[in-house]
């Protein structure tokens, strides 16, 4: 059995070689003698643990013999910083990020500006100039929240081809105009991309794609409603069109009928993403809090 003996590097990082299969938490508890589970979780949260030179934050990541685990002393040299994008999870196959509103997920044929994909591509190329980022799904520019990118074409294709089997839960939170009548419900229609907007019909005309959104009303206040939404399908602008159909457009969504914009943004956020890892087959679950601006909007009493 290979030893977990550390190798000292000039940067004073501490590197270990994996001798037998283990989860990352178990390995670090043994390798860093005397360390507590709380301290290990802090190291992972602070993004100072690398597996085969990739920052890893998931405590139950699987390790195989021959891999290297590095605990970085100089956090600044490995930390990703961008005001529009936060890395929530990363391994050798994929990256989960939280995107701010106003940032495109990927460049289009007509728009070549800096995107989340560009930003992440620059980041992974710092490790190896041949590294690339592959698009798996998208969020509208105006929508904030969790999304995932692949690090290789094989993982990208597997995720895209098996999306509905792999992704078990994908939820959004939105603030809409008016008091939503139902406490819960489902919206179904056939959506067609008209480039400038997405058209919806309640019947199949041969052009549209069936789109299904489930919703739950969390709170009603100040002439607004806070909704949690679960996508059964993932069409372009699906939530925005469906809520506009209900005559409850999302706050700040002028394109689809909103007449108010009190927080200067579209009030739509992808707060939960759950899936089975395409390579390790581990269950992965990521969740962010409801945006503070959404909560304040529901507390504010209008005069």
Image: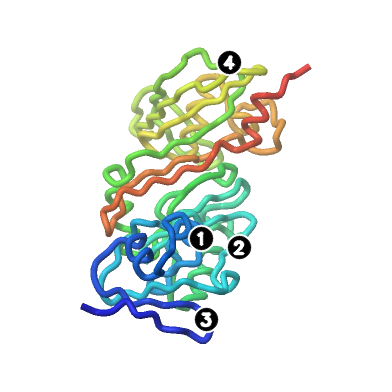
Identify the mark nearer the N-term, 1 or 3: 3
Give 123 or 207, whichever is nearer the viewer. 123
Q: Nearer the viewer, mark 3 or mark 2?
A: 3
Q: Residue furthest top?
A: 181
The coloring applied to the image is rainbow
Residue 109 seen from this side: no
Marks 3/4: CA–CA distance? 59 Å
> Which label sits on residue 117?
1
Residue 161 position (above or below residue 299) = below
Marks 3/2: CA–CA distance? 22 Å
Residue 190 position (above or below residue 271) = above
Choose top left, top right, bottom left or bottom right for residue 280. bottom left
Residue 83 position (above or below residue 101) = below
> Which label sits on residue 179?
4
> What is the x, y in percent for residue 272?
45, 40
Identify the mark nearer the N-term, 4 or 2: 2
Identify the mark nearer the N-term, 2 or 1: 2
> Which label sits on residue 81?
2
Marks 4/1: CA–CA distance? 37 Å
> What is the x, y in percent for residue 181?
51, 13
> What is the x, y in percent for residue 270?
50, 40
Residue 180 position (above or below residue 90) = above
Quadrant of image for the C terminus: top right
Q: Which residue is mark 3?
A: 12
Identify the mark nearer the N-term, 4 or 1: 1
Choose top left, top right, bottom left or bottom right for residue 268. top right
Give 131 or 235, whichever is nearer the viewer. 131
Task: Determine the secondary structure under disc 1.
Answer: helix
| Residue at left offset 39%, top offset 64% | 151
Q: Are marks 1 and 3 in contact (CB under 8 Å)?
A: no
Q: Nearer the viewer, mark 1 or mark 3?
A: 3
């Amino acid at each position: 059995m290979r030893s977990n003996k550390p190798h000292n590097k000039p940067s004073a990082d501490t590197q270990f070689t994996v001798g037998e299969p283990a989860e990352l938490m178990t390995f670090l508890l043994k390798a860093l003698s005397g360390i507590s589970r709380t301290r290990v979780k802090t190291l992972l949260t602070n993004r100072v643990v690398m597996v085969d030179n990739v920052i890893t934050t998931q405590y139950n990541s699987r390790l195989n013999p021959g891999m290297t685990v590095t605990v970085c002393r100089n956090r600044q040299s490995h930390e990703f910083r961008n005001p529009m994008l936060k890395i929530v999870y990363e391994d050798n196959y994929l990256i989960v990020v939280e995107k701010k509103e106003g940032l495109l997920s990927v460049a289009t044929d007509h728009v070549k500006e800096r995107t989340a994909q560009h930003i992440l591509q620059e980041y992974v190329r710092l490790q190896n100039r041949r590294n690339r980022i592959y698009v798996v799904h998208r969020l509208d520019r105006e929508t904030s929240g969790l999304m995932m990118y692949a690090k290789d074409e094989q993982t990208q294709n597997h995720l895209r081809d098996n999306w509905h089997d792999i992704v078990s839960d994908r939820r959004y939170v939105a603030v809409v105009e008016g008091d939503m009548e139902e406490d819960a419900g489902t919206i179904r229609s056939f959506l067609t991309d008209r480039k400038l907007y997405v058209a919806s019909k309640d019947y199949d005309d041969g052009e549209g794609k069936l789109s299904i959104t489930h919703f739950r009303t969390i709170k009603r206040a100040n002439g607004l409603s806070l909704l949690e939404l679960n996508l059964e399908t993932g069409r372009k602008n699906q939530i925005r069109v469906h809520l506009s159909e209900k005559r409850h457009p999302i706050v700040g969504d002028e394109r689809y009928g909103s007449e108010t914009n009190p927080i200067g943004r579209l009030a739509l956020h992808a707060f939960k993403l759950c899936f089975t890892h395409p390579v390790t087959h581990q269950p992965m679950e990521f969740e962010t809090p409801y945006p503070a601006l959404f909560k304040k909007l529901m507390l504010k009493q209008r005069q």
